[in-house]
Image (cartoon, rainbow, N blue to C red):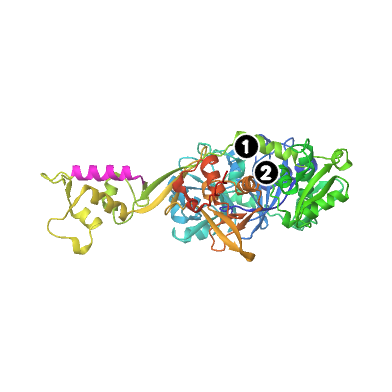
């Protein structure tokens, strides 16, 4: 569900009464849970946030956060704990154990299949417990009981047993490293010992399943309605899913906020007259909070001149035409009630963002190209305990081949750069027509052929997080210029999410840096979300990626298409 970035439809703070109600519901739904475990995660004194989101697949989901940590989410009619919550309280859901090697597959979007579930087969039909279909469960590993994924059973326990280890066991909804987990920042998976039962806990999974039957959250019940219609202010009751404030009104509010804030900060001692376009680029746009994106075309004013004319009517500023089509601000009434009564609605949010930026400044991920063992080369690699699907670097592949050749005495006695191929190497590396009585290859060709017979993959590791293995080759960030209606050019930046770059933050940097409107769009060819910037801004975007985000040039495609402005003649 959360593999791709999701769209936040609304975000509201919970009142104390709502916090207590949520805590009570969590306690009922996830019984048994120790009081100290619950209090460590759900502390009423902390800030609680309700977030309504729409996933990339169009699914509507509600997420509850304490501070910045997501603790539970509601999908369909059920409440699920996040892996962060399960790390603090691992006994609240039944779990299935799997192998560490399965983690990269889950991170690639796979569900947990029955062959990957570790069970005690001596239990017979009870090997998978007594869970009904669609029961919320989590997945951990044989060496670390900390949760790596949360989902629901695809089959009942009895059907799993009857399936003879074929088919799906758990439909994964949320996993380690997905966009929901990333809301927690750099919190990494702890190393937990095998689970021990809480005092008073059920004696078997059947009792846990019975407790989970009450986990449903009916949208018609008073409890659910209290969360779906939260009071943002005491005097304003609004439906969370369908806010009364239109997107255009939101942009109008943001535009006015940025205008007034600029006059209270960067333009507090502005030299007049000041060209309106310069004022917009140097003062209004930089005043926009980083979590927002200001596009004046999406406001009711549509044009800067109309907005400034409105502010002139209010008596805040004076605007005069300097020449045909060129306007300038000639006076500012700093004593106007609009400025005197200014309240920085987004100030607290901005301060938190600034603190986060200092605390969690972006660090480029480490990327390692690897090769996975395939059936073709398995007879060679299995001798060194490398099974099918195991990922190895080119150096490790070379080491295996070297040890194999030395142990089987396959190096040519006279030509040291040539390797004589035995039956296993011939079957793995040669085509049928190439096989003869004395097949041989140079070391270089032997290595290259072996790599070609293996499947390519890459391991991407973000600071403070566990490495994730992904199949195929790493697709670079792509910069391209497209033409829209009216022969207007736009710059599209794709693939930022692969490198863990916050699209909203990147769009804001582009907006302020080039004084152009930006937006986040979905690629028509399903390449994922893109940042769209008005005009040909390839030069700025590539410089931003190289200088600020410190990405290597090989991970950015299309930077060579940057347009350099000609130098002005003196």
User: Relative to 372, is 32 on the left or the right?
Assistant: right
At mark 1, the secondary structure is: helix
Q: Position of residue 504 (x, y in %)?
A: 63, 48
Q: Which residues are magenta?
A: 392-407
Estimate how packed mark 2 is, as few (under 14), some (14 to 19) or many (20 or more) residues with alpha carbons within 10 Å: many
Quarter of the rendering occupied by the N terminus: bottom right
Image quadrant in which you'd find residue 302:
bottom right
Residue 426: in sight, yes or no? yes
> Above or below — where is 169 with respect to 290?
below
- Residue 207 shows which numbered tag? none
Magenta-highlighted stretch: main secondary structure? helix
Is residue 28 within the magenta segment?
no
Residue at the limit of the structure toward the bottom, as seen here: 485
Whichever of labels 2 and 1 marks the residue nearer the N terminus, that label is 2
Q: Position of residue 460 (x, y in %)?
A: 46, 45
Residue 229: in sight, yes or no? no
Q: 313 or 161, which is in the foreground?
A: 313
Q: Do labels 2 and 1 touch, CB within 8 Å?
A: yes
Tally the marks: 2
Is residue 401 within the magenta segment?
yes
Estimate how packed mark 1 is, as few (under 14), some (14 to 19) or many (20 or more) residues with alpha carbons within 10 Å: few
At mark 2, the secondary structure is: loop
User: Relative to 257, is 352 on the left or the right?
Assistant: left
Residue marked by disc 1: 357
Residue at the limit of the structure toward the front, as seen here: 570
Q: 449 or 211, which is in the foreground?
A: 449
Q: Position of residue 95 (x, y in %)?
A: 54, 47
Quarter of the rendering occupied by the C terminus: top right
Q: Position of residue 124 (x, y in %)?
A: 46, 54
Image quadrant in which you'd find residue 300:
bottom right
Residue marked by disc 2: 290
């Amino acid at each position: 569900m959360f593999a791709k970035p999701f769209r936040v439809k609304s975000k509201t703070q919970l009142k104390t009464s709502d916090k207590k109600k949520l805590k009570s519901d969590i306690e009922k739904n996830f019984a048994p849970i120790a009081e100290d475990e619950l209090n460590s995660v759900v502390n009423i004194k902390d800030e609680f946030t309700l977030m309504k989101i729409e996933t990339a697949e169009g699914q509507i989901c509600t997420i509850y956060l304490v501070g910045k940590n997501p603790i539970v989410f509601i999908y369909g009619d059920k409440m699920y704990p996040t892996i962060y919550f399960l790390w603090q309280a691992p006994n609240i859901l039944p779990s299935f154990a799997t192998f560490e090697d399965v983690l990269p597959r889950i991170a690639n979007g796979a569900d947990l299949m029955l062959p990957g579930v570790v069970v005690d087969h001596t239990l017979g039909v009870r090997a998978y417990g007594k869970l009904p279909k669609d029961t919320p469960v989590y997945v951990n590993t044989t060496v670390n009981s900390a949760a790596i994924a949360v989902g629901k059973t695809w089959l009942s326990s009895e059907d799993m047993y009857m399936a003879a280890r074929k088919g799906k066991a758990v439909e994964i909804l949320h996993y380690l490293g997905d966009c929901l987990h990333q809301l927690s920042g750099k919190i990494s998976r702890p190393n937990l010992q095998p689970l021990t039962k809480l005092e008073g806990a059920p004696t078997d999974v059947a009792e846990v399943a019975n407790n989970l039957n009450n986990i449903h959250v009916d949208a018609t019940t008073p409890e659910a309605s209290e969360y779906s219609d939260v009071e943002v202010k005491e005097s304003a009751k609004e439906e969370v899913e369908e806010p009364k404030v239109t997107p255009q009104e939101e942009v109008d509010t943001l535009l006015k906020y940025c205008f007034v804030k600029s006059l209270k900060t960067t333009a507090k001692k502005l030299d007049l007259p000041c060209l309106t376009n310069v004022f917009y680029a140097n003062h209004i746009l930089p005043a926009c909070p980083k979590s927002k994106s200001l596009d004046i075309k999406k406001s009711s004013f549509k044009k800067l001149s109309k907005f400034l004319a409105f502010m002139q009517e209010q008596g805040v500023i004076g605007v005069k035409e300097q020449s045909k089509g060129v306007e300038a601000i000639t006076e500012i009434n700093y004593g106007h009630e609009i400025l005197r009564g200014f309240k920085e609605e987004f100030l607290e949010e901005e301060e938190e963002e600034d603190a986060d930026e200092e605390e969690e400044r972006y660090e480029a991920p480490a990327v390692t190209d690897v090769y996975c063992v395939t059936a073709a080369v398995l007879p060679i690699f299995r001798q060194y305990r490398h099974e099918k699907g195991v990922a190895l670097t080119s150096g490790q592949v070379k080491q295996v081949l070297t040890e194999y050749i030395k142990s089987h005495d396959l190096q040519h006695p006279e030509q040291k750069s040539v390797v004589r191929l035995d039956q296993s190497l011939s079957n793995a590396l040669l085509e049928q027509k190439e096989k003869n009585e004395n097949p041989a290859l140079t070391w270089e060709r032997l290595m290259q052929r072996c790599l070609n017979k293996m499947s390519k993959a890459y391991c991407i590791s973000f600071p403070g997080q566990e490495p994730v293995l992904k199949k195929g080759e790493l697709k670079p960030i792509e910069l391209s210029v497209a033409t829209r209606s009216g022969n207007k050019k736009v710059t599209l930046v794709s693939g930022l999410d692969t490198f863990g770059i916050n699209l909203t933050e990147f769009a804001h940097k582009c907006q302020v840096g080039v004084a152009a409107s930006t937006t986040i769009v979905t690629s028509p060819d399903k390449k994922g979300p893109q940042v769209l910037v008005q005009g040909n801004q390839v030069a700025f975007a590539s410089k931003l990626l190289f200088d600020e985000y410190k990405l290597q040039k090989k991970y950015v495609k299309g930077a060579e298409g940057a347009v350099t402005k000609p130098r002005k003649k003196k």
